[in-house]
Image (spheres, rainbow, N blue to C red):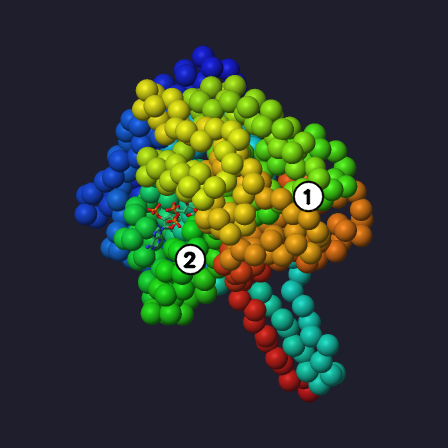
Amino acid sequence: MQLTLEKKAIQKAVARLKFRTQAFIDGKFVKAQSGKTFTTENPATGQPLAQIAACDAPDVDRAVKAARKAFESGAWSRQKPADRKKVLLKFADLLETHAGELALLDTLEAGKPIGDCATMDIPDTIYCIRWHAEAIDKIYDRVSPTGPENLALILREPVGVVGCVVPWNFPAQMVAWKIGPALAAGNSVVLKPAELTSLSAILMAELAAEAGLPAGVFNVVPGYGETAGQAIGRHMDVDMVAFTGSTEVGRYFLKYAAESNLKRIILECGGKSPQVVFADAPDLDVVAANAVSAAFWNMGENCSCGSRLIVHKTIKDELVAKLSKLAKTWKVGDPLDPQNRLGSMIEKPHLEKVLGYIEAGKGEGAKLVLGGKRILEKSGGYFVEVTIFDEVSNRMKIAREEIFGPVLSVIPFSTEEEAIAMANDTNYGLAASLYTRDLNTAHRAARAIRAGTVSVNCFSEGDITTPFGGFKESGFGGRDKSLWAHEQYTELKTIWMQLT
Ligand code: NDP
């Protein structure tokens, strides 16, 4: 289904939607073995959407067995890279055919604006699968520079059975970031979507099978973190887990691995990303536009959200005035209305968590200059105003903890050393932005900031060609996107030969 971004057309398309609600294991839709289901809800209305199979350890075990069997058969793992490419390109084509449906599913389950889902998330999802598919028959292994009496091949081989546990903030896209390189490299995958957003992942599994992916190569087990997620983490026959989500749950995966089979764990966790604006920033209107996007895009439910705006004191008041004016134009409301830039928070407990942070900001003496309240309560949805705090100190709770909501903290500074020290004074290190006209300042600061991605004079996570991941408690073990993502789904093997 292709979608016209017009309110009536969207309503009609929603009415035609069909939900796939079962697990997808060994090439088939199946119920959870317990027969249990859980409710998925539309956070913009508070109304239930569907009942989803609640998978637990026995379902994960079944999926892992199917994945292992498929892996050992070689039907995918030992297929020629050019043939894997063909299947994945067909998969991308099918995703494209279903782009409208995928965008609607993510909007309905996550409360994300349909404009963003239709023009960013889903096109990026498709492009990600295509990019990794295209790459796979262009990657060479190596021959080591030994003496003439030996030949040493340095090879990359698929890891085996890969568990993927993903969050709710970019449901389809996070699936693609994991399975794109994992499947391209020849692995079998068992994926658990976030319990709040399972629908697009289940559809993606069906489309992958339709494209020709052999049964068992890509399995989706919807369910709760503590049950299905933990079962993946602790399974003795899962070779690695690629996880995106909170740092807290990332720690659990390290524990699961330590207490089971020492599986490889790749963590992409939270952030508290600084945006540093030097006094010589090129154009404060451009800075304001970028800063508003960095803080409020996807309702701030973004791991690289630029939630700390560290601004030179001489330009702070002018920039705050521009930010407030611009932020007011970011309309909050029904995510199915393409006019709205922000939808709802993901669920009621999360809304309450975000409102709790706003109260903490007020309580600690930050100056509330915009927003700060729950709105549109009659809709039944979990909407919060775009919120800006000025005069924040980097020691305050709102400057230290990941809020994952549309809350921007403005923190003044006087010297470059102070700005860099504040930017780095965080447990996280996922992303950062900086604004300056001076090439020397840009280089110096970009090198000094401890973060996986530093963007200069813009807000960006780079594109599919650049690795994405964090320093410090933002994660470790590998990177999403780019050819570095392929590496993390492979084992390095040396074949050492004696020549005569
Ligand atoms: P979680 O880290 O709890 O969830 C991420 C994934 O891990 C989900 O699939 C979840 O399943 C699963 N999971 C949860 N608990 C366990 C467990 N004990 N064992 C194994 N798997 C588990 O993120 P939340 O969705 O709860 O959000 C909480 C906070 O995390 C947010 O407020 C935000 O600060 C941060 N976050 C960061 C993200 C990022 O991109 N870095 C993305 C999402 C959240 P289930 O959905 O069933 O709980």
- Give the numbered dot on residue 445: none
Dot 1 or dot 2, earlier in sequence: 2
Question: Which residue is identified by label 1?
Answer: 312
In the image, what residue occupies the spot 23% across and 40% down? 37
Question: Which residue is identified by label 2?
Answer: 250
Left or right of residue 385, residue 418 in this image: right
What separation in Å lies between label 1 and label 2 (alpha carbons)? 35 Å
In the image, what residue occupies the spot 71% across and 52% down? 416
- Front of the two marks 1 and 2: 1
Image location (x, y in percent) of residue 92:
54, 38
Mark 1 falls on what kind of element? strand
> Number of marks in the image?
2
Left or right of residue 142, residue 339 in this image: left
Circle 1: is it few (<14), some (14-19), or many (20+) Cα within 10 Å?
Answer: many
Viewer-closest of 268 and 135: 268
| Residue 132 sits above or below residue 47 on the image | below
Instruction: Locate residue 20: give its quadrant.
Output: top left
Q: Is mark 2 within 8 Å of ligand 1?
A: yes
Image location (x, y in percent) of residue 55:
27, 48
| Residue 380 sits above or below residue 396 on the image | above
Image location (x, y in percent) of residue 219:
38, 48
Q: Is mark 1 within 8 Å of ligand 1?
A: no
**In the image, what residue type sits under mark 2?**
Gly
Image location (x, y in percent) of residue 230:
32, 57
